[in-house]
Amino acid sequence: MEDKLILVNEQDEEVGTEVKLEVHEKGALHRAFSILVFDSSKKLIIQKRAEGKYHSGGLWANTCCSHPREGEKLDVAIHRRLKEEMGFDCQLEEKFSFIYEVKLNDLKEHEFDHVFFGNYDGEIEPNPKEVSEIKRVSWSELSQDVEKNPDQYAYWFKIIVREINQRKFI
């Protein structure tokens, strides 16, 4: 059975479900999440998406991002996916959300994205099917590099960096 994503309206109210690939082919608005995990020295753990990802492969992105599955609560999905993708879990707190829409190759991302922050200093064991590389960067270094080299970063991550800078979260 293929994973189904949760379709939402602009108030993040569920309006149905649909198979993941069909959602991305149609550009239907769906629930998503992005996780940013910092270490005790306030460096952000970022990942380079595996080349084999169906979109945005080889681009740098936040620590983890995905979608809750049909019938799965957001607070369960964030911990499940962080463990699957990065090999660890930690306490997470939602900071803000936003809606974005972008065409990526033959697919369209149209997400209601919930952004979570966490802190973690332990072992990281990324799933090589999801992540090709990880690194820790200071916020100022990241912000400057996103400005200088925007084509090296996933579309939604650039929005997140801009939002965090505007809201002065860091």
Image: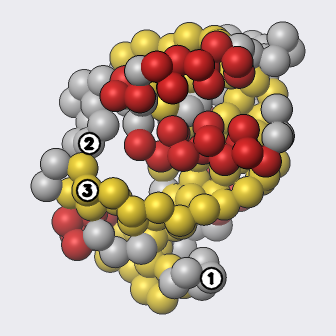
Q: Residues within 10 Å of mark 1 (few under 14, many from 20)?
A: few
Q: Quadrant of the C terminus?
A: top right
Mark 3 residue type = Lys
Pointer 3 local density, CA inside 10 Å: few below 14, some 14–19, many at least 20: few
Which three-letter amino acid code belongs to the residue tagged 1? Gln
The residue under the point 51% across, 39% down is 157
Write down the residue under mark 1: 11
Whole-percent x, y for residue 23 in the image: 29, 69
Q: Which residue is mark 2?
A: 55
Q: Is residue 124 visible?
A: no
Q: CA distance from mark 1 to mark 2?
A: 26 Å
Which type of secondary structure does the marked residue at label 1 adopt?
Answer: loop
Do the residues under discs 1 and 2 have CB atoms within 8 angstroms? Answer: no
Q: Is residue 32 above or below residue 48?
A: below
The residue under label 3 is 103
Determine the residue located farthest toward the left in the rendered image. 106
